Amino acid sequence: MTAVETQMTYNSSYTIQHEETYMTQEDDWDRDLLLDPAWEKQQRKTFTAWCNSHLRKAGTQIENIEEDFRNGLKLMLLLEVISGERLPKPDKGKMRFHKIANVNKALDFICSKGVKLVSIGAEEIVDGNVKMTLGMIWTIILRFAIQDISVEETSAKEGLLLWCQRKTAPYRNVNVQNFHISWKDGLALCALIHRHRPDLIDYSKLRKDDPIGNLNTAFEVAEKFLDIPKMLDAEDIVNTPKPDEKAIMTYVSCFYHAFAGAEQAETAANRICKVLAVNQENEKLMEEYEKLASELLEWIRRTIPWLENRVAEQTMRAMQQKLEDFRDYRRVHKPPRVQEKCQLEINFNTLQTKLRLSNRPAFMPSEGKMVSDIANAWKGLEQVEKGYEEWLLTEIRRLERLDHLAEKFKQKCSMHESWTAGKEELLSQKDYESASLMEIRALMRKHEAFESDLAAHQDRVEQIAAIAQELNELDYHDAATVNARCQGICDQWDNLGTLTQKRRDSLERVEKLWETIDQLYLEFAKRAAPFNNWMDGAMEDLQDMFIVHSIEEIQSLITAHDQFKATLPEADKERMATIGIHNEILKIAQTYGIKLSGINPYTNLSQLDISNKWDAVKHLVPLRDQMLQEEVARQQANERLRRQFAAQANIIGPWIQTKMEEISHVSVDIAGSLEEQMNSLKQYEQNIINYKSNIDKLEGDHQLSQESLIFDNKHTNYTMEHVRVGWEQLLTTIARTINEVENQILTRDAKGISQEQLNEFRASFNHFDRKRNGMMDPDDFRACLISMGYDLVSVTRRFQAQMDLHGLLDVLNRILQAVLLKFSVCFELQGEVEFARIMTLVDPNNTGVVTFQAFIDFMTRETAETDTAEQVMASFKILASDKNYITVDELRRELPPEQAEYCISRMTRYVGADASPGALDYISFSSALYGESDL
């Protein structure tokens, strides 16, 4: 049993004993009082009027108090009206035993309310015993109208008397000392009315020597304006030496309830307004959270399919446009959503703190809109976003490679087709059938040279096929055209091989018949063909396109080109030797007078062809030099961009990490107050905001690098993605940390805890926060509670509370806690149950960790003064005049318009047996405000 329960039990016992003593004294006094006929007359009139004031609520009344209660029906109805409770169903018969049974039900109900009935039986009431009937009615009045009156630790008769004395103290000629002669002149009643409703009576005009006029004025005003029926006659009071005390008490108690009810109604209305204002504000925050969460989740839902669309474009320009759209998303569309996500978490934490401080149940967002759901959706968005960017860059590289290969394919195909043009017709000729021996031999040599040339072009055909295969593997958009052209070249190449073999067979068949050959032409052809092929290869290499991504790669190409230029002198010697053979042929022909046809029978190449092609090679060499030097300049510019980006990234990356660590240290630092921590965090936040320009500059350098197709950087380990993620985490961390300190300030101010207590809480939390991440796991939390003297066994907790109340020194307190810890081993099972209950308070979402805010809320939970559902119900009951329901008119009369309409729109229809048209159920409404089931 707690100290509160012990106090309640003591107060209850004291009240019962006091009431029994008071009731016993009253009963002894009653028996003497009822012997006076004058007092009996006053009681008849007063008690009859009092009963009718309640029975008229049920649409009935009595005329003769001893006769109308004899069958027990109206007596039971009276008890139901004044108590608000249902009595057992009455017997409907008219026999004597039916009446006795009904009266007994009423008397049993009175006894159930703690009233001791002395010498009052059902038979006396049924027989119309006026003394017993009046005694019973007085007992009911005493229990339901006077007993609950409480003024400054006095109750019942003494409380009512003290209330009258306090209210009439300022008035002249009024001295209330009892409930009989102090009221004879009527001034006390008029003073009570004037004190509460000065607009109804002009007290200055009343005279002490006009008691009947004063009494009648009070009676008429009370009946007309205060709804208090006339229960006494002025003449009876004035003409009786000592008016009946019970009659006076009964009548005066009506004034207490009328005026005290108005004060209670005002207090109750204020309480309800306060509760409803808090609830309306919380509902507004909940609606704002739901709206913001829905919009953010809807944006994520719309954005993810766009990022998951991996349909590649067929041209480099289209893919670069996609990349530009993605950059626009990163710069323009995403940053506001990052702010919304951070604001959403802040709103959620603030709402939960306000709900805890107002004793409301924790806010549970709609399904799929928890902070964790939004965090998971955001994580999924960032994963898809990262994959999309990687895909874009991969596709751009692929298209770049494809464009290069396609151009190379076209160039090689054009050169090959140029070389093969007319070769099929040439191989299909049958000129050897009519040729001379010399011509046959010439044709044979010519064919051998062709075969040599054909073999030399085999590599080119294989290169064409390899390039076509790579284009297909890279999913080139015009692969069909490439395949068709490659297939045509391969088919033509196979046909050339077949035709070459056939012609060779034919020439070899006729070669035996012809024996003329010119060795010089043959030698020229043999030397000219390889040299010509070398020049073709050199021209092809000099015109070959290249793609590089670093200075090292272009330097490698320059080295290869320099090596090629070093071979030019030897090639020139070969050219001169080949041309020398041709000159020798001319010399021999001129010397011996040989008439040459001008055509080398072994080759189509001439000295002019070699010279022209050599000139072309010499012309391409400086052009190649120029292309390589331009590429060197471009790669040097790219290197400068890499170094420029790296220089900034290597500063910004560590700066972000340092700020994260400094903010973490501020959040766990206990050296200063919460306001000092807040000022420090605000300064960090301003510094971070001011640093945004450096991030923007880095973004600009990153964009220039991507526009220059720079995809790697060996000078830094930081990528733009790393910096973006770190920057977003820094913004989120500073905002979340500021929000946590704000919530701590709210908790401190709401619960009245000192800075020293907060520092002690923070020191204990930091000590057991082993991971230094601002959260404790359940085992660390359990150890923290034990170290702070919070034992998990109820016996130990009570003893610990006593120790705290006696203000023992901290060292002695820790020693006793250690002893209690050993003692609590015997209660391990109870401790586990208690700890499980505590975990449901500090970790309602079952995340497996305890934050510092939840830790403070738990440690200060018992100190808060908050409203409860029972208090709100009691307030509504006062406004409803003790009914189990309340009407629309009563709400609009007692509450401000906004709160009244709020209640009317949310209260359900009351369906009890005593319901009236338009009745509203305030009980279920009060329970719903605090997340409880109907009481």
Image: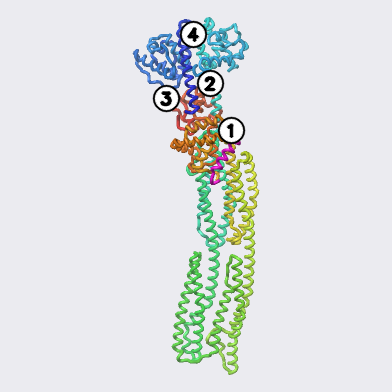
CA–CA distance in space, label 1 to label 2: 33 Å
From the image, state whether disc 4 or disc 3 is nearer to you. 4
Residue that label 1 marks: 752
Q: Residues within 10 Å of mark 1 (few under 14, many from 20)?
A: few
Cβ–Cβ under 8 Å for marks 3 and 2: no
In this picture, is 579 found above or below 753?
below
| Residue 913, disc | 3
Cβ–Cβ under 8 Å for marks 1 and 3: no
- Span colored in magenta: 751-772
Could you tell whether 31 is left or right of 675 in the image?
left
Could you tell whether 764 is left or right of 70 in the image?
right
Mark 1 and mark 3 lie on one chain; the one further toward the N terminus is: 1
Quarter residue 178 falls in? top right
Foreground of the two, 434 or 640: 640
| Residue 261, disc | 2
Question: The residue under label 4 is which amino acid type?
Answer: Gln
State the image coordinates of residue 873 (x, y, percent, origin top left): 49, 27
Q: Residues within 10 Å of mark 2 (few under 14, many from 20)?
A: some
Could you tell whether 687 is left or right of 140 in the image?
right
Mark 2 and mark 4 lie on one chain; the one further toward the N terminus is: 4
Quarter of the image where the C terminus is located: top left
| Residue 42, disc | 4
- Please tell me whether the stretch drawn in magenta is mainly helix, strand or loop: helix
State the image coordinates of residue 451 (x, y, percent, origin top left): 49, 82
In this picture, is 453 found above or below 340?
below
